[in-house]
Image (spheres, rainbow, N blue to C red):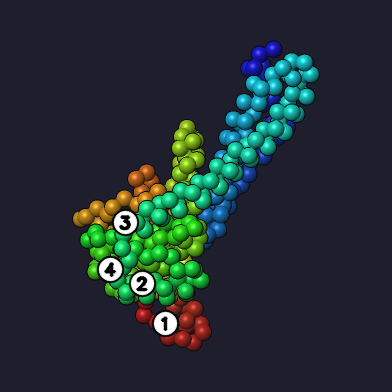
Amino acid sequence: MSFVDFAVTYFTSQPILLTLGLLFSSVALLSALFRFEKHRPQMRLRILFVSFAMDVLTWSFIASSLILCRAFLSLYETSGDLAGVETVFGLSILVSLVIALPLSAFVTFKVPGAVARSLMQGLPPPERAVTQAGLRTATGLGLAFPRLLQSPSGVPFAYSVGGAESVVVVSRGLVTNLDEDEVETVLAHEFAHLKNHDTALNTIIAVHRRILFFDPFVRVLERAIYSEKEFSADELSARATKKPLLLASALLKISSAQAGGRAPPVKVGGFSILGSSKILRPPNVKLRIERLMMLAAEFDRDALLHGHVPAAR
């Protein structure tokens, strides 16, 4: 009996078909839920991440099954279909988890920390006013104050790298081109990425994308997650500072300035205020501004309902 015969028997057996059918139907259900949750980026992120995890586990299960079919070919030949399929099926589930979880944990804890330490060695802290604004903003978000660093670049940009040692980098151009309140909203956006542990998620996805280079679904999920993380950070910044229109103004200024001068590339796992990436197209700035304007209108409605005069934003 050949390996191909065993593999065909295994993948056409009832438990395997039921397992794969359950996985694919779950992804389809999650896709429908994602479309339903149009204006809740945090919920959409959770749905996307579960979909991504299921995709990774599916490929890990398939790969483990093929390897174990080869390893247990002699059992299939001597004991028959049922014993061989049951043995490989049980071990494949265990092996797929053992492979996927430690790899994800390793890149989550090791890669961002190494990137953050390299930034700390090469960049100085910003001026006192920016540090104080960052401290106030981090306190408002309930976040431990990260290390603030300043790039000498005249192009306005900001990005964050989370982990055991979290870092937020702002450029000299950002501080000089934006008003103080606008800088505060940009810092709140980057701190929101840290609060949501977006760096860890981004690193895990980047590593698995390289492993599953043949799977177009991973790239689709990565693009969607990438955009929703920016929308979520915008919303958290707006709700923490109550200044959504100032964040919108900051995005417009940064986008216009970067059109004439390229910002330095973001480190692995990092998040730029404009969502810049070598691989993924950043979320549309116009759409982000429109969402922030909707939040401003929501805040004004809430203020009127409670008998308050809407504040300038």
Please say if the residues under marks 3 and 2 sit with CB atoms less than 8 Å apart. Answer: no
For marks 1 and 2, give the CA distance.
29 Å
Pinpoint residue 28: horizontal percent, then vertical percent: 59, 43
Q: Amino acid at mark 1?
A: Pro
State the residue position of label 4. 175
Pinpoint residue 13: horizontal percent, then vertical percent: 72, 26
State the residue position of label 1. 310
Res. 69 visible in picture: yes
Please say if the residues under marks 4 and 2 sit with CB atoms less than 8 Å apart. Answer: no
Q: Residue furthest front?
A: 121
Q: Which mark is residue 131?
A: 2
Q: Residue furthest top?
A: 1
Q: Amino acid at mark 3?
A: Gly
Residue 121 located left or right of residue 38 = left
For marks 4 and 2, give the CA distance.
11 Å
Q: Which mark is residue 122?
A: 3
Please say if the residues under marks 3 and 4 sit with CB atoms less than 8 Å apart. Answer: no
Q: Nearer the viewer, residue 164 or 260?
A: 164
Residue 3 appears in which quarter of the rendering? top right
